[in-house]
Structures are given as structure tokens and as C-alpha cells.
Image: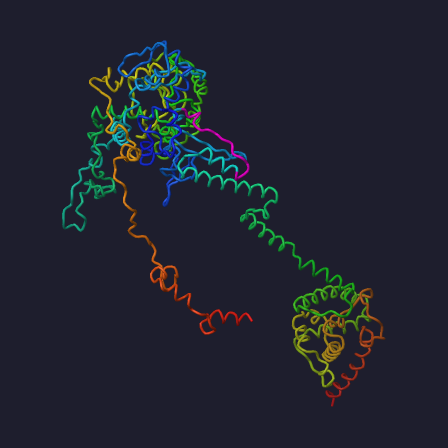
């Protein structure tokens, strides 16, 4: 059958191998040299045709001639090409001698491309790909991230850390040299410790009143410290010794619990406060006004001076008597 | 002569011309002379003029004579795929291949099996609706008479109305069937038959025939007596034609659209067409295979030979069917037996390969010599002579001289270059 007629039918009517795009037509026939749908490239419309095909790394030259056009099973002559690229090119030239230049050229081009990708394949197998591409699992990642956040939130790490730190504080690991970072946490901790100790205090009070007088006073002093109102004495030292904003803040934030239960001594509280603050810093406050169990306190004896309750008590008395005297004097005149 | 043709230098990319296409079979025949001639010598060679040539003392010259006197020959295969004989090729396969004609005839003939469809003739008009006329502050469309229901007073009859009749209601007296000229129909069928013998067209249509032994594929008559599908499958597998059936099996899919519920549930490709002369059971053997169709050679159907109007159906002939084709269509010289007064269509061009004709020696030798090549517009892109030195030289040859004479001093040196030098320092 005439090639021209075949091309007319295939091109203008129907060909199952033709793939049409906006710019170009492609040919899906496995024997097409170029892959394009052309008059010259069509393996169906050219009774004399040649292609290069690669099977399992071996390159073959397929040739078809008009003499075998009637027999599809024997149509293509399969010629194995040399692995050597230059030799293979020569082989093509020899087999397709006297064929149109287009055919020879395209076959050589195809051979070149195939050898290039075979080389690349071998190289990749040897060296391997540097990176492995994996997919981003958006749904998975999102789900896990939110779960992580929830777990973190549920774990309440800050609480456990806080507890741990307070434990250590109680044990006295930090000694005296703690610097407060967060006012709120400190105040909260203060309150906590206060609550604990309040319970203890009450229990002790019931047992021993005498002993508790001082302690009460101490406590009251402590409570007084926490009052918003500040009662300033005449003595200048008190004023000087008064703490800065820190103390004020602390006083404000901490709760007033003991006030209702016990009376307060303004003067005492102020003095105590100011002295404490001046000497020991704000963190000393709870300790100053709070009764401590024997086991808890690691304070040294009177040797440390104003540290420790006993030493503190001594000082108190002195001031107290003075103030009372002055006060009574002022009233009674 | 044959040797020369084979080793022709710089031949055209196309195959040989119409007449030389016989060379294919010719070479084949010469090569297989040893195998085939004993039988042919005995039986005699069928000739175009319906005579039989019997030659004594067959020699090479006789063979050559034979070539120009007789028709090409096609092998016949048996159930196991072996060649058991040959048949001469009927002249139908020389019919001009006319895709345009086949397409138009096919579209006409395909309409002949239609069933009428129409809407109910009274649809939309079964109301006593009347227009309320003007003056009622409503559109003038006829409105449904009566009362007591929503429907009362609603628009009726118009194609725009809800519940109205459609625009141009379809009628059953539409012209469903199309009459085609008998000769055109016969031409189309003959052309389609010819196309089945062209392997590229069959492949292009989408059939998987890469491994079959020959095109056209002729099978011995014992196939007509097949009753079992098993034997049919065995035959197809032996001929490597089963790949086409497998293609059909894989292609079965649910139809998209409402056709699903209208008894057109599945769609699949078309497989091989088996053409027989006498049904001695062959229909029963092949009919259950998906995609396979069967036709009696005396009742060839264009809708099966060129499905969709596309040429090149894969056909499997039985030997008697193949031999009967000459009686069905006639030969180049003799009219058809079965179609009254019918002759096969003749070619307008004996050799349709125009390029080869023009380049042939007979014509080239008579043409006058070609003149010098004159390119009307040699330079497709205009290049600026002020920038492009070659173009400048072309237009002004003296420019080259000027440049050569020019001496380079610090003043003429390229200032930009100097600047870059300075910056680098």
C-alpha cells in the first residue's frame, strides 16, 4: 500500500498513536525515532524505517523494509549494537547506508541520548542519589503538632518544676543567695508557704501559749508586714531602713490572714519589717514573721546578728519598750 | 532487475509506487520459489483473466513472466498457525482507499438502525388555559383556568412556563433514516475491505496485531466447523491474534452518563472481525469472545468493517470467504456475480505517489535545468551595522581598512576598560 495514502488517512483522519497538544503533535508509537508526529517520523507511514531501542541496557537497531510489510511478526529486523558508542555509530552508518540522511541522523541522535541516560543510570547506581526525597505529610504533621501542644499543656511542667524548686528551697539547697525573677511566682510561693506554716502555727499556738506570744508577735509582725497600710514610727532609722518598691509590692500582693486572728503591733511590725528588709532583703520576710519548725530552720545562732529569730526577738524588745513608753507618755500627759 | 531495485541508492523514503508494491510479494515469491512452485506448478497459477496458467519446465524466465501476468498470493494458516497453502489476492484489495467516502457513508448508514424518540404529543397542552388579556396587571401568557389550587392562574403552554410544553416538541416523523446511493455504499464497503489489508491502517486504528503472521490473515476452512469456544481461543492464540481480544477484555468500563440505565451499561473496544463463507458452527465458537464479531462474506457490513467511520478493522478471513470475494465484488475486468452490474471502482491515478513521479527519471529528464537559487529575503533578522562589525564591513568595505589603520593610544583606549582596571587596583 502506498505510503502517501497511509499518511493521508493517519494524519487527517484517525491515528491511535497521535497525541495532540496546543503547540505540537506527538506520536506514542514505540518505534518512532523522534517521538513527534511527522510525515518523516511516522513508523506507519514509512515503509522503510529504522529506530533505536534500548532493552535492559542493551541497544538495538530496528529496521523495517517494504519487502516485509505484509508480515507484522517479521517486520522489524533487530540488530544488536556495540556497547562502544563510536562503534555503534559506525554500525548505524553501515546498516543504513544509502538511506535518507534524515533517518541516519535521527537514529544517531537517538543512540546518543540513550547512551547518555544509560551512563547516568550506571553512575547513579554507583554513587547513589545525594538526597532522598520524601513527602511532607501535612495532615500527620499538623495532627502531631497539636497533640504535642496539648500534651505539653496537660503535663503542666511549670507546676512540677515549681514544686521541685520549692522542695529544693525548703531543703535549703539555695542558701541565701536567690535572686527573684518573677514577682508573681515569688508571691505565690510566699502565700503557699505562709498557708502551710499558718496551719503549723495554729497547732503550736494551742499547745504553748507562752512560747507563742513571741511567735504570735512575730507572726503578727509578719502579717502586719503584709498590710497595705504602713505605720511609720518617729524613729528615723525605720524610715531609712524601709525597703523600696519591692517590699511594698510584696506587701501588697501577699494576703492578710493573720490579722483577724491576732492583733497587730504597728510599731513592732514596722521596725521588724524595715530592719529585715534592710539587712536580709525581701526574701527574708516570710522567715522573719513566720514561725519555723526546728528542723526547717538552718539559721545560725545569735552569732549571725540579726539573722535568726532569737536575735531578732532581742532587738524587738528593746524597741518595743521604748515605743510603749513614749506612746503612753504622750497619751497620759 | 530485482537485485538492482533493492540496492537502489538514495531512494525515496516512501515505499515503492503502486505497481512496485507488488515487489514485496514478488521478492517473497522469488525467495520462496523452492517451497511454493511445486504446488503452483501442479495446480496452476490463477490469472487476472480468470484463466489458469500451467507451465511445464518451470524456469527463472517463466517466473518473471508469471510475475507480470498473475496476482499476488497470500498464505493460508491452519489451526496451529502453520502455513498450509496460498490463495491469490482478490482485486477488492486494489480498491482506492477513500477515508472521506467511508466516513460519510458510515455516518449515513449508522442512522438506519435508529429508533424514533419524541415527547408525548399532548404534553403541556392538557389544560384549558386561556390568556387573561390586558388590563389585569399580569403577563399575557395563557393561564390555567379554574380555582382552588396553586395551579390555577399559573402560566401554561409556553416553553418558558413551568409545566409548559417544550420548544419544538420532538416528533416521531423526523427523518430517521438516510438513503445513500447504492454505488456509494458499495464503494465504501470495498474501500473498507481494501483497508483491512493495510497493516499500518489496522495498527493505527488501534488493533494489537504486532505479532500476527500476515496481513490479510487467512485461515483454513476447517475453522468454519469450530463449535467450541476453546478451539476458537486456541486458534487465535496460535495466530498471536488473541492480544486484540485481551485488549477488549481490559477495556470494559462502565459507561459515563445515563446510558447506564438505558441498557448501554458497559463500553468496550472492538476486537477482530471473523468473516466466513458458510456457518458450520463457527458463529457458536467465536460469538462468546469479547469484541469478536462474525459476518458472512456475502453480507459484509460497513459498520463492522470501518467502525466509527475509521478504516482498518482487524479481519480474519476463512479461505473460502477469501476466495469468494472475487465473486462478491468482481475483479478488475469481470463484474460481480452477487451485485448486479457492479464493477469495482477504478483508480483516478494509477500511481498515487506524486513525489516519486515527479522525481522519476522519465519526468526529470524532460524538465529544463533549474535556475540559480534566488533567495528573496536572505536576512530574516536585521543586524545593526553600528554594532555588528561583520555587517558594517559588508555595507562599507572601507571600514575594515580604517580599523586596521587605527593606532591605539592612551586617548583612544576604551575608557571603560581603563576604569575597570583602576577599580581593580
Indicate the quadrant containing the C terminus of chain A: top left, top right, bottom left or bottom right. bottom right
Q: In front: A271, or B55?
A: B55
Residue B266 visible within the image: no
Residue at x 55%, y 42% (from the top left corner)? A119
Residue A17 visible within the image: yes
**Relative side of B40 to A333, left or right:** left
Rendering coords of residue A67 (x, y %)? 39, 26
Rendering coords of residue A101 (x, y %)? 40, 39
Q: Is residue A331 above or below residue B331?
A: below
**Relative side of A68 to A232, left or right:** left
Q: Which quadrant holds residue B301?
A: top left
User: Which residue range is magenta in the image?
Assistant: A71-86
Q: Is residue A316 above or below residue B424?
A: below
**Residue A141 located within the stretch drawn in magenta:** no
Indicate the quadrant containing the N terminus of chain A: top left, top right, bottom left or bottom right. top left
Q: In front: B49, or A319?
A: B49
Q: Is residue B81 above or below residue A51?
A: above
Amino acid at each position: 500500500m502506498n505510503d502517501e495514502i497511509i499518511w493521508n488517512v493517519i494524519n487527517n483522519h484517525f491515528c491511535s498513536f497521535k497525541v495532540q497538544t496546543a503547540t505540537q503533535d506527538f506520536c506514542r508509537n514505540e518505534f518512532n525515532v523522534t517521538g513527534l508526529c511527522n510525515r518523516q517520523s511516522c513508523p506507519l507511514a514509512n515503509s522503510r524505517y529504522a529506530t533505536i531501542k534500548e532493552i535492559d541496557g542493551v541497544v538495538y537497531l530496528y529496521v523495517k523494509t517494504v519487502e516485509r510489510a505484509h508480515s507484522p511478526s517479521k517486520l522489524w529486523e533487530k540488530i544488536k549494537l556495540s556497547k562502544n558508542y563510536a562503534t555503534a555509530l559506525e554500525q548505524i552508518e553501515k546498516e543504513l547506508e544509502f538511506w535518507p540522511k534524515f533517518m541516519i541522523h535521527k537514529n544517531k541522535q537517538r543512540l546518543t541520548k540513550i547512551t547518555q541516560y544509560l551512563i547516568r543510570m550506571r553512575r547513579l547506581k554507583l554513587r547513589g542519589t545525594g538526597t532522598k526525597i520524601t513527602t511532607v505529610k501535612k495532615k500527620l504533621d499538623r495532627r502531631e503538632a497539636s497533640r504535642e501542644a496539648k500534651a505539653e499543656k496537660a503535663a503542666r511542667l511549670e507546676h512540677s518544676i515549681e514544686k521541685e524548686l520549692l522542695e529544693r528551697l525548703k531543703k535549703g539547697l539555695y542558701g541565701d543567695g536567690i535572686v527573684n525573677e518573677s514577682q508573681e511566682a515569688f508571691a505565690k510561693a510566699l502565700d503557699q508557704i505562709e498557708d502551710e506554716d499558718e496551719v503549723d502555727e495554729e497547732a503550736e499556738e494551742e499547745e504553748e501559749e507562752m512560747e507563742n506570744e513571741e511567735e504570735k508577735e512575730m507572726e503578727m509582725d509578719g502579717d502586719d508586714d503584709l498590710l497595705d497600710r504602713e505605720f511609720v514610727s518617729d524613729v528615723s532609722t525605720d524610715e531609712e531602713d524601709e525597703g523600696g518598691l519591692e517590699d511594698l509590692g510584696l506587701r501588697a500582693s501577699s494576703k492578710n490572714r493573720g490579722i483577724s486572728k491576732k492583733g497587730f503591733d504597728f510599731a513592732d511590725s514596722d521596725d521588724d519589717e524595715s530592719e529585715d528588709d534592710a539587712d536580709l532583703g525581701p526574701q527574708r520576710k516570710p522567715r522573719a514573721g513566720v514561725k519555723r519548725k526546728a528542723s526547717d530552720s538552718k539559721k545560725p545562732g545569735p552569732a549571725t546578728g540579726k539573722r535568726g529569730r532569737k536575735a531578732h526577738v532581742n532587738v524587738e524588745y528593746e524597741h518595743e519598750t521604748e515605743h510603749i513608753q513614749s506612746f503612753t507618755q504622750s497619751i497620759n500627759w | 532487475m530485482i537485485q538492482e531495485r533493492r540496492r537502489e541508492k538514495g531512494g525515496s523514503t516512501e515505499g515503492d509506487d503502486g505497481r512496485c508494491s507488488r515487489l514485496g510479494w514478488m521478492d517473497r515469491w522469488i525467495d520462496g520459489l523452492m517451497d511454493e512452485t511445486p504446488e503452483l506448478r501442479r495446480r496452476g497459477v490463477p490469472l487476472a483473466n480468470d484463466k489458469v496458467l500451467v507451465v511445464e519446465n518451470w524456469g527463472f524466465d517463466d517466473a518473471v513472466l508469471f510475475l507480470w501476468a498473475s496476482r499476488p498470493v497470500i498464505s493460508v494458516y491452519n489451526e496451529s498457525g502453520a502455513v498450509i497453502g496460498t490463495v491469490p489476492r482478490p482485486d477488492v484489495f486494489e480498491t482506492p482507499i477513500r477515508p472521506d467516502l467511508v466516513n460519510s457513508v458510515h455516518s449515513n448508514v449508522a442512522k438506519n438502525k435508529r429508533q424514533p424518540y419524541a415527547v408525548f404529543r399532548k404534553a403541556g397542552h392538557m389544560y384549558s388555559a386561556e390568556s387573561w388579556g390586558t388590563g389585569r396587571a399580569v403577563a399575557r401568557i395563557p393561564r390555567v383556568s379554574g380555582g382552588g389550587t396553586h395551579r390555577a392562574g399559573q402560566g401554561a403552554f409556553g416553553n418558558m412556563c413551568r409545566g409548559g410544553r417544550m420548544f419544538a416538541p420532538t416528533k416521531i416523523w423526523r427523518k430517521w433514516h438516510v438513503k445513500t446511493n447504492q454505488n456509494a455504499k458499495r464503494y465504501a464497503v470495498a474501500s473498507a475491505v481494501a483497508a483491512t489489508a493495510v497493516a499500518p491502517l489496522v495498527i493505527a486504528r488501534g488493533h494489537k496485531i504486532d505479532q500476527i503472521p500476515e496481513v490479510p490473515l487467512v485461515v483454513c476452512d476447517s475453522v468454519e466447523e469450530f463449535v467450541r469456544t476453546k478451539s476458537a481461543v486456541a486458534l487465535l492464540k496460535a495466530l498471536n491474534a488473541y492480544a486484540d481480544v485481551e485488549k477488549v477484555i481490559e477495556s470494559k468500563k462502565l459507561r459515563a452518563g445515563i446510558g447506564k440505565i438505558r441498557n448501554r451499561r458497559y463500553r468496550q473496544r472492538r476486537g477482530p472481525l471473523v468473516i466466513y463463507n458458510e456457518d458450520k458452527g463457527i458463529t457458536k465458537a467465536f460469538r462468546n469472545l469479547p469484541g469478536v464479531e462474525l459476518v458472512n462474506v456475502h453480507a459484509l457490513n460497513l459498520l463492522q468493517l470501518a467502525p466509527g467511520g475509521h478504516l482498518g478493522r482487524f479481519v480474519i478471513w476463512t479461505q473460502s470467504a477469501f476466495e469468494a470475494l472475487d465473486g462478491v465484488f468482481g475483479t478488475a475486468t469481470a463484474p460481480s456475480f452477487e451485485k448486479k452490474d457492479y464493477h469495482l471502482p477504478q483508480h483516478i491515478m494509477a500511481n498515487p505517489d506524486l513525489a516519486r513521479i515527479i522525481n522519476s527519471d522519465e519526468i526529470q529528464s524532460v524538465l529544463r535545468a533549474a535556475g540559480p537559487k534566488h533567495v528573496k529575503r536572505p536576512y530574516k533578522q536585521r543586524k545593526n551595522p553600528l554594532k555588528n562589525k561583520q555587517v558594517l564591513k559588508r555595507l562599507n568595505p572601507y571600514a575594515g581598512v580604517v580599523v586596521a589603520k587605527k593606532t591605539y593610544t592612551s586617548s583612544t583606549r576604551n575608557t571603560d576598560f581603563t576604569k575597570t582596571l583602576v577599580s581593580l587596583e
